[in-house]
């Protein structure tokens, strides 16, 4: 069975819901607390695995109970975590989220995700070369992404780069990506002098821009298309982009065309936004088959 490699971040969201945000030095009582698993890397790995893809994860956690839980959650979702490293010098990645009056404030601590470097990726070259497609996002170092891109080029493995969250990357890394998958606002930051239309026309069969409830825009070398997403009652769009990428990569690795892979991404992501939570809403293949045929 073909394999998808995901290089990226793994973290836990610690969420407190309160009526009022505390002032400096103040303690307020919260109404609710829960944790959810996150990190764009982990989310994309789970999204693809739920669609029965064979997924191998590369990333790092700390030697703490949060790291153990992160790994256990990935295993439960059938993601191969044998190459995920546990590092002693820092904590696992964590986001401390306070929700008051429907507004978020977030302290994000990259922790072990900040230790994912080129050397670690190079060490896992054989694992990468045994995969059929690779994915990375911007929550690990530029160096790590570049080494992965280079290994993929050498081994002729398609490389999907999701440049999220946006940060400046070397032009050479963007060039090395086989597929570049920003959302609409990331696309505007990547190509500030171009409209979305112009940007996809300049990067045919490569730049695939997710546009929320509108769907996805790309150019097939002849013309630009908007591939509309499915109409649903959205309740929580957290992780929609990550779910899309899991579906898109699953399509490509199963030899679907670029457009059909986009349709699978839309199908999976539109289903996910009908439920709460990033990973919580990610559909299993059976659910897609049942709901939409
Ligand atoms: P991100 O989560 O990275 O900001 P988008 O908002 O562009 O990404 O959403 C990614 C994909 O999720 C869209 O291309 C679409 O397939 C799906 N999606 C997002 N919001 C909706 C919605 N309201 N209805 C249906 N599909 C949606």
Image: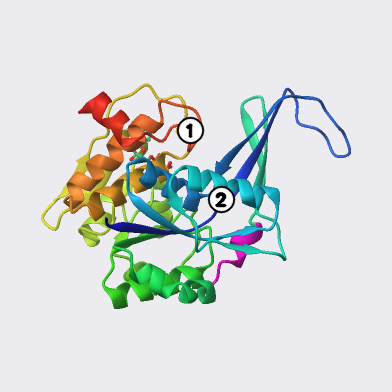
234 above or below 7?
above
Tell me the residue that label 2 is attached to. Answer: 71
Establish whether ligand 1 lies closer than 8 Å to the Cβ of label 1: no
Asked whether 75 or 202 is in front, the reply is 75
* Residue 47 found in image quarter: top left
Q: Regarding mark 2 in the picture, which secondary structure is present there?
A: helix
Tell me the residue that label 1 is attached to. Answer: 280
* Quadrant assignment for the N terminus: bottom left
Magenta stretch contains residue 178: no
* Quadrant assignment for the C terminus: top left
135 above or below 66?
below
Magenta stretch contains residue 113: yes
Can I make out residue 270 in this image? yes
Q: Which residue is at a point 66% across and 48% down the rendered structure image?
A: 66
Q: Regarding mark 1 in the picture, which secondary structure is present there?
A: loop
Q: Which residue is at a point 30% across and 42% down the rendered structure image?
A: 265
Asked whether 121 or 103 is in front, the reply is 121
* Mark 2 / mark 1, whichever is N-terminal: 2
What number is the disc on residue 161? none
Can I make out residue 173 in this image? no
Q: Main secondary structure of the magenta part?
A: helix
Picture coordinates of residue 245, whole percent (x, y)? 35, 48
Picture coordinates of residue 45, whole percent (x, y)? 43, 50
Picture coordinates of residue 105, whole percent (x, y)? 67, 38
Residue at the farthest right position: 25
14 above or below 196?
above
Say whether residue 226 is left or right of residue 239. left
Q: Which residue is at a point 28% across and 64% down the rendered structure image?
A: 158
Q: Quadrant of ligand 1?
A: top left
Report the magenta residues as a range.
111-117
Say whether residue 188 is left or right of residue 98. left
């Amino acid at each position: 069975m073909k394999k998808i490699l995901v290089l990226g971040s793994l973290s836990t969201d610690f969420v407190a819901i309160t009526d009022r945000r505390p002032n400096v030095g103040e303690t307020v009582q919260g109404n609710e607390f829960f944790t959810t698993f996150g990190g764009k890397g982990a989310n994309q790995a789970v999204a693809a695995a739920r669609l029965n893809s064979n997924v191998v994860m590369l990333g790092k956690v700390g030697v703490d109970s949060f790291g153990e839980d992160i790994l256990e959650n990935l295993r439960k979702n059938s993601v191969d975590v044998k190459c995920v490293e546990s590092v002693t010098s820092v904590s696992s990645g964590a986001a401390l989220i306070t929700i008051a009056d429907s507004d978020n404030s977030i302290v994000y601590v990259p922790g072990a995700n900040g230790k994912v470097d080129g050397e670690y990726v190079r060490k896992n070259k054989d694992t990468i070369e045994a995969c059929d497609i690779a994915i990375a996002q911007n929550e690990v170092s530029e160096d790590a992404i570049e080494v992965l891109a280079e290994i993929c080029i050498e081994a002729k493995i398609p490389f999907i780069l999701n440049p999220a969250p946006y940060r400046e990357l070397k032009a050479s890394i963007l060039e090395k990506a086989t597929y570049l998958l920003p959302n609409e606002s990331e696309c505007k930051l990547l190509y500030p002098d171009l409209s979305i239309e112009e940007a996809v026309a300049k990067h045919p069969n490569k730049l695939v821009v997710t546009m929320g409830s509108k769907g996805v825009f790309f150019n097939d070398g002849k013309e630009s298309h908007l591939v509309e997403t499915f109409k649903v009652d959205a309740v929580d769009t957290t992780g929609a982009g990550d779910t899309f990428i899991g579906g898109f990569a699953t399509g490509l690795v199963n030899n679907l065309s670029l457009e059909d892979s986009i349709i699978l991404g839309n199908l999976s992501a539109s289903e996910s936004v009908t439920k709460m939570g990033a990973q919580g809403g990610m559909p299993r293949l059976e659910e897609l088959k049942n709901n939409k045929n």
